[in-house]
Amino acid sequence: METEFGMSLKFGTSGLRGLSVDLKGKASAVYATAFARHLLTSGQARAGDPILVGRDFRDSSPDVSATCIAALKKAGLTPFDCGAVPTPALALYGLSLKAGALMITGSHIPADRNGIKFYRPDGEIDKQDETAIAALAAEIEAEGISDEAATAEDHSAIAAELFYERNIALLPEKALSGLRIGVYQHSTVARDLFVDVLAHYGADVVPLGRSESFIPVDTEAVSPETLSLLKKWSPEHGLDAIVSADGDGDRPLLTAEKGVPLRGDLIGLITANFLDAGVVVTPVTSNSGIEASGSFEVVRTRVGSPFVIAGMAQALAEGKNGVMGFEANGGLLTASAFTLNGRPLSPLPTRDSFLPVLAVLLLSAEQKKPLSQIAAAYRLPVAAADRLENFAQEKSAALMAHLRASRTNLDAFLAPVGTVKGLSDIDGLRVALTDGSTIHFRPSGNAPEMRCYVEAANQDEAETLLNKGLDLIRNFG
């Protein structure tokens, strides 16, 4: 939905996003009111019911949060202010109360952008909910609405404690003793909880790089600046791993002992084996070697947590057990209850960065092997990904239309990198080449970015293919 009060605002792979200047003020009041009205009219909430509001550390987030709180009160609900808290913590608290929730966050995108993630009392909204909320927002805008701010009862400590208690029950006592782990704190809302949870398990924790200004960390396409820091800190502090997350703490960043990040889909795969999963739902962008790396069934989807959640719901509807999902960015979701450390683990069907990090670190501690060796043992195709920022969405659309128009166009476009063997159009264009490598072009759903994903036999080939793919995109037209 695009309107005069928020031209850049759109629902993408996970929630509403756009420029902060478009979201602040009237637009945030409109969308909060639309969400409240959707919950009330659909019978998912009743007048007076609680609704949670959390936020990340962006400069614009407190203002958006205050406007949403005022709008939710006017709409007839009772907002609780959960403060700066990881998205999975907010979602867990909402599930425990059977209450809806709004997370004010732009996740990993630049600081001049922001967004809202919406949660029903039973979990993250789906695409049908998005359509309904957008339609209601258009009606509410036409009605006219104020954008005043308000405060609400502070539940930040309750939400954080509930999530902490969940995570300190996952592993045996002192399971990470002997590991020296850095926590790149930057501006993620997960920064203090990571330190506390890792310390609880006996790890020697070294906080690093805390920032009072917002730093957009993308766990799927780690910036050269971030990579440089990670590779510097690891030997400097004698670290076995570095842990971090994106802005709202739902996507993990985990490095091996030399500061090189592990792929998010490898982290998800290790966690699937840790959970003894029966069904793994994951997007088409996750590594193609996953199917051969566990005893579970694999279901592929489009990119975005709503599609993974829909795939998990379908598996549950078919009577399947041990259902979980993960994305190539490392965010992990559980749709079934699991048993860990002799204790039940309730479902958390939204991206979580803590469970996957703990699962991988436990494997390193138990096997007494560095993470680089553990990663290499999986023998997955080497994958790499990056994006072109400030790449107009109109240009992305033109490129994809050109490639889909004919096989001749596709063959000619990819001639500098290889010969097309086969392709998938589940989400973007994922092309298998005759030399066994893969290249995948996919426009961002909510930002002016074009992403390229590749797989190849080794790191050098993957990086070469990725750079060539980015050049092809850059030079189009």
Image (spheres, rainbow, N blue to C red):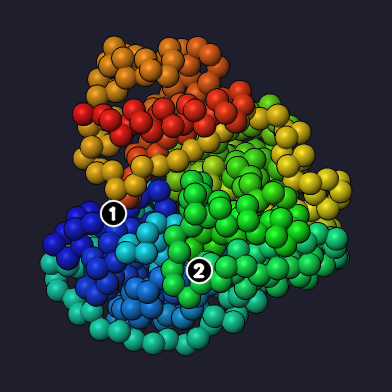
- Asked if the residue at tag 1 contacts the one at tag 2, i.e. Cβ–Cβ closer than 8 Å, the answer is no
State the separation of the CA atoms marked 2 and 1: 24 Å
Left of 251 or right of it: where is 28? left
For the point 45% across and 45% down, the residue is: 304
For the point 40% across and 48% down, the residue is: 13
The N terminus, quarter of image: bottom left
- Identified by mark 1, the residue type is Lys
* Residue that carries the numbered disc 2 in the rendered image: 187
For the point 37% across and 59% down, the residue is: 110
Between residue 371 and residue 447, name the one nearer to us. 371
Residue 195 vertical position relative to residue 464 in the rendered view, above or below: below
Left of 425 or right of it: where is 280? right
Place of residue 199 in the rendered image (x, y in percent of width and height, measured from the top left): 76, 70
Asked whether residue 318 is in view, the answer is yes
Element under disc 2: loop
Place of residue 195 in the rendered image (x, y in percent of width and height, measured from the top left): 68, 70
For the point 72% across and 62% down, the residue is: 237
The quarter holding residue 462 reads top right
Q: Residue 472 got which mark? A: none
Residue 73 vertical position relative to residue 190 in the rendered view, above or below: below
Element under disc 1: strand
- Label 1 Cα crowd, 10 Å radius (few <14 / some 14-19 / many 20+): some
Between residue 31 and residue 174, name the one nearer to us. 174
The C terminus, quarter of image: top left
Answer with mark 2 or mark 1, whichever residue precedes in sequence. Answer: 1
* Residue that carries the numbered disc 1 in the rendered image: 10
Residue 204 vertical position relative to residue 75 in the rendered view, above or below: above
Asked whether residue 72 is in view, the answer is no
